[in-house]
Each structure stands twice: as structure tokens, then as C-alpha cells.
Image: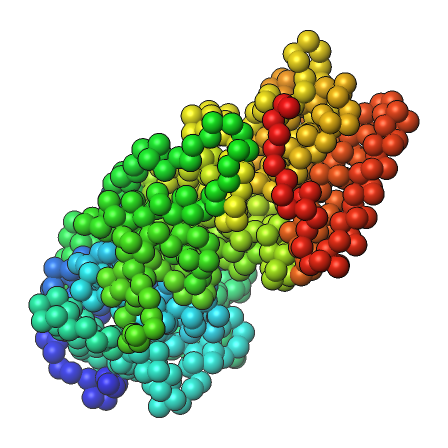
Amino acid sequence: MSVDTQQASRGLTDEELAGLDAHWRAANYLSVGQIYLMANPLLTEPLRPEHVKPRLLGHWGTSPGLNLVHTHLNRVIKARDLDALCIWGPGHGGPAVLANSWLEGSYTETYPDITRDATGMARLFKQFSFPGGVPSHVAPETPGSIHEGGELGYSLSHAYGAAFDHPGLVVACVIGDGEAETGPLATSWHSNKFLDPAGDGAVLPILHLNGYKIANPTVLARLPEAELDELLRGYGHDPIHVTGDDPAAVHRAMAHAMDTALDRIAAIQRAAREEGATSRPRWPVIVLRTPKGWTGPAEVDGLPVENTWRAHQVPLSAVRTDPEHLRQLEQWLRSYRPEELFDDDGAPRPDVLAAAPAGPRRLGASPFANGGLLLRELPLPPLEKYAVPVDEPGASTHEPTRVLGDLLRDVMDATSDRRDFRLVGPDETASNRLQAVYAASGKAWQERTLPVDENLDRHGRVMEILSEHTCQGWLEGYLLTGRHGLFSCYEAFVHIVDSMVNQHVKWLRVTRRLPWRAPIASLNYLLTSHVWRQDHNGFSHQDPGFVDHILNKSPEAVRVYLPPDANTLLSVADHALRSRDYVNVIVAGKQPCFDWLSMEQARVHCARGAGIWDWAGTEDGTREPDVVLACAGDVPTQEVLAAAQLVRRHLPALAVRVVNVVDIARLLPSGEHPHGMSDFEYDGLFTADKPVVFAYHGYPWLIHRLAYRRTGHAHLHVRGYKEIGTTTTPFDMVIGNDMDRYRLVMDVIDRVPGLAVRAAAVRQRMEDARLRHHDWIREHGVDLPEVADWSWEGSK
């Protein structure tokens, strides 16, 4: 449907039109003021250079369009009494969203010193992009926001995540035409195939085509309208166009488009909820074409600005030094007729706010944008129900993630009525051994199904799409609006969302300092199909570096766990699912793994984060150990215990301590991370001067980086993945990266003083075993029997 300004509906009365236009002009005025002014907010005197900020920062180009959308959302929210949320996708639309929040009063309620008068307006203006103030984009500090303005590409997936399981919520999503060129945004158009009109809310995409990015035209804005319509219809949407530059005509067209879209959404939901319709609906999308920098300077220094890329940031850049720029700025500000919009005290006049909703219906006050207010405790069952029995360490094996899957099934079942838990992942739930969840919920799917399909469910809460970006965006939107979830992913490919998790960690770090932001459920990753068991898929699937990436981030917000067996995975997962305001990364295997600790032992060990496994070593407590064998991760743990067993057999007089680390941040100094150890604790565990041979799941230099300030760092030797990989056998992976049991024994011999000579024959045996392995796998295609059939012998 096309609703252009030549054929717009006459649904608005002249009085309503005047009120909407007044609100829009007021928001535009406040947006310009934030970019430029630090004094004289109401222009009660002629504008002088000292009224202008010394550094001009911000983005004007997108602001008029965002102000238009906000103004018209106000009207429909109030008229229809809607629960609504808006995702502001264009990167730096901060001035617009702040302006509207101030107009509606939610900003003053959040920040009482920014009053709705001339004094508060001056503070609003000065703080914007100013030292000690607020960012230029829509940030955590912005009331009503769940989407960081710099996150280009993720707005639509965030919007769908917010709408899932909120059946009464309408989520408007403004998508900038620059943002629309990104891969994550392009994929997230398919989210409508996963939105259940019966049990979920609705998403109203608003594709804002103002024509330009920073310095170039945008692709979608230059497409012929018919071709763009074909694209959007191919995505499953029915487009409604609003096009023009005459404010009155655009207001009428936008009002009609909003009403048309919301009527269609109501009809779709009514058909699903009351009439039992099951076919996938075609949801509306509004295509809004307005000029970039609309209502700003048409020309500056002889060059066109409005409706060009030059309007993107600060159209008049030399206001303090160029009298002509100063004159144009004052003319621009006065063109909005502020004396009609604000009273003598600087408060918005009643007609400006005529269409604005009240209380929690205001976009800046929506509880859905402060999801912690809606969050309920997750009903987690007792872990003993799922714990594997461990009478002796290493006497049995289980697939850790399969055991976890039983727990997640029951969490999914316990939340079936309240619907506030989802499991997301890129087509890997069953591959990662979590398929038990299908007994409680199928996979969300709104497309047609075939007889061969399994576990597809129109109302399902398991989310699978082969786009890590979309999975991440869905889950972030879900968590930020007050729910719980888990992201399961192959370890090597979670890197695809590196930049997304960056932004989420930054969001969490900032919100921790905002007392009005209630804590939300943590973003939990389960990384499996990991580096050491990707021997079959080869080098492309072997990358454990996400942990390094995460540990570079704000220590207060990130946690990394490497549980070595099924019961420790249960304990860590239980802790992560109960936590708030963290990004928790859990790395665990899906292949059969030895069971080392009972449930009670696992709880205690995970609470410590790192500890001595006295049953695995040979120290007797009468003296310091000769060497420490340390490990973090399931395969490194098995190799360290196999090495300890070899040392016991071949070097029985050696005092060996075995240390397992579950919580990697424990290795950091206590002053660098809340989970870090003091030097006293660290030296007690690892010793201050004895050799430490550390087998680590990922890149070995991470351990060195974490422990570089420790007294015994010179004696620390780390084995891990060093980018040696191929399609081979599981044990050949550890051999190739020198983390195998034989190499670890050789490291002990090389580093314990005096052993190089006394144990030369033992070292030679270890080297011979590695050579035998090399020849064996090339002949037989499987690992050596002594490795494949290895078991823990205990202290025998």
C-alpha cells in the first residue's frame, strides 16, 4: 500500500494536526539545541558565540525523522491505550530520543535535576556529548531504550526478542537505511517466520529512508519503489509508504500509515487468538521517506546540506568563529517558533503535549524498556535430580551437555505457563546434545511444515536459525525486557557475535551504575562442540578464542567457566541461570567425558573456582610438591590426570599436586577482577617457586596474561591450543598442540630440577609413545588403544 503525501488520508482534524506538528517542532528544536547550545536555551537574547559549545558533536541528519516517528507513536499509544516499546536503530539518534523523553516528562522523573523548564532545558542541552554528560547516541542512560545506538544492524532482532512472549506488546523498530545494509539486519527480516501471532507481541518495522549514510547514498533509498516493495514482500511484509517533505502532508500520511498498520496487526492477532488461524501472516512495514536533515539549513557555504549526506552530523560547524554560521544557526532555531512551544518558564505548552500518553504508556517510562522491573526468579529444580552418581573419580562417563539438557527440559516445562525462558542457537540444539528440551517445547516455526519435519511448533520456545547474529539479537531483546535464556553455540562460530557481545557488556557495565535500571537476567553462553573434539570437521571448526575476547571486557560484567565434567557443568549452569547483569561463558564438551566429582564435591569446587584435587596427586602434606599439574577444561583435565597417572607409575617418588580451575578469572589478581585471588591464595595453590605445568583449553598465552604479575610466573609453563589443527583423531589434536599426557610428563621432567638426567629413560618412553601414535593413526585411522581405552586407576 502506498500512502504518499499526494494521496494521504484526511483522518486528522486540523486541531490534531496542529498539535502533532507542535510536538514535532518542539522535539526538533530540542534536538538542535542539544547539538549546539550551552546557554540561552530559549533564545531570550540574540545568539552569541559564547552560547555555543566549543566542541560540536552529535548527529542531526536522522533526528527529524526519529522525532516524527516518536510524535506519531505518542498519538496511537494514547488513542489505543497500547503497551509499546520503540527500538531506535539509526546509530546516533540520541538528540531526538532525549528530546522526546524530556518533553513527556520521563527524563525529569529519571533525572530530577533536568527539570522541565528553562533551567532544565539548559542542562539538557549542555550535558549532550559534553564531558561529564551523556553520549550522543541512544545509550543505557536514555530512558525507554534497550538498544545501544552504535549497534548498527541489530535493531530488528532486538525488537523481535522483545516481542516474543509479550502478547500485549507492540514493538516499533526504526531501521535506518544505512543500518539496513548490514548482514545482521538483512537476516533479521526473517524473524517474522518465528513470531507467533497467538502468543507473542507484534513488531512494526519502520524503514526510514533519508537517503544517505555518512558520505554516501544508501542502497535501499536508491532502489525504485517497485523493486523495494518486491524485496519487502519477499521478506513476508506488506509495505505502507509515507513519502514527502511538506510537514502537514507527511503528518497526515504518517497518521494514516500508523493506523493502517496497527489495524492490520490487531486483525492478524484476532485471527490467530480468536479464530484459530494458523497460516503465517504478512505483517505490515512502514517505509518512511523524508529528507536527511529535514528542516535544517538548506545550504551552507554555498553547498547543499538538507537532503544530502552533509546533514549527517553537524551542518554548521564553525558557529563560534564564523558570523554567517552563527546567523544561520539562530535562524534555524527560530524557524521552529519556540515561543509557541514553550511558556515563559520554558515548560512545554499544553498543545505540544496534547497527543502524548501518560504514566507507563510513555515510551520513556515503559517498564518493558527496564526489563528488570518485570523479571521473575527462574524456577530451577534441585540439581540432585540430574546429578550423575560418582562413587569413585573417573569410574564412569557421561555426555555433560546431555545431562544439562535434562535440566533445561524441566526449566522449559516449569515456565510453560509464564513463558519467560527461551533457548536459542544456530541449528545446533540436538547436535549439542540438548534435545531433551523438545519434550517440553518444540522449535518456534510459523512456515509450512512437511511430514519429515520434527519438533516444529508454532508456539515453541526453542529458537533455531542459522544466523548467530539473529540468535544473539533475539536473546538480548528477550533478556532486556525481563526474561531468561541460554545461547548454545559451536565454540568456533560464536566469534560471529564478537561485536554484539561487546556492546551488551558495555550496556551492562553502564547500567550497573544507574540505580534506576533494575538488574536483568545474565546473557548465558554454552559453547560446546569445542576445539578438542572438532577433529572430524577440521581446522575451520577449531577456535577457542572467544574466552580471550570476553576476558578483555569489563571485569565486573564477565565470567568464564570451564567445568571438567557433568556435575560441575550442572553446578555452573545453575549459578549462571540465577545470576544477574553478567555475560557468562560456559565451555563444556558434548562427547562422553569421565565423571570426576560428585554433585556435592562439584558444588564446593565450583564455589572455590579453583582447587587442589588431592585424590589425583601424590603429595602427602609433609612438604611442598615438586611440581604442580594444573588444568582448565574437560580435555585438558583428562590429559593432566593421565599425565599424573604416568608420573605415579614411572616417577613414584615425585610429589605431584593437581589443581583444577573452573573459573578462569580466579587466576587474575583480586584487585583486577571480583573473582580474582590474592597473591597469598595464588601462591598457596600454585606455590611461589615450583614448576607449574598448566594444560589449558584455549590459547596458552591467555593464562600467561592473567598470571603475569604472580610471584611464580617465571615457573609457569602453559600448554594449550596453538593454532595447529586439521581433520584427524581426537588424541592427535592434543598431540599436535603439545598438550597430550606424554608431552606433559616430558614437561615435568624438563622443569623439575635434577630430573633431566635421572628420568631420561622415562622421557624417552614418552617421546616414543608420541611417535607410535603418529604411525598408528595413519595406519588404523583411530587413536592408540592405550589412549582410546584409557581409564583412571586412582591411587592404585
Q: Residue 386: tell me if it is visible.
A: yes
Picture quadrant where residue 262 is located = bottom left
Picture quadrant where residue 664 is located = top right
- The N terminus: image quadrant: bottom left
- The C terminus: image quadrant: top right
Q: Residue 693: tell me if it is visible.
A: no
Q: Residue at x 22, y 56 (%)?
A: 166
Q: Is residue 616 above or below residue 273?
A: above
Residue 280 in picture, x, y percent from top left: 24, 75
Closer to the camera in the image, 218 or 548: 548
| Left or right position of 159 against 319 | left
Toward the top, the furthest residue is 622
Q: Residue at x 53, y 77 (%)?
A: 216
Q: Is residue 399 above or below residue 69?
A: above
**What number of labels is visible?**
0
Residue 613 in picture, x, y percent from top left: 58, 24
Which color mode does the image show? rainbow
| Left or right position of 736 against 121 | right
| Left or right position of 275 against 496 | left
Closer to the camera in the image, 329 or 214: 214
Closer to the camera in the image, 182 or 288: 182
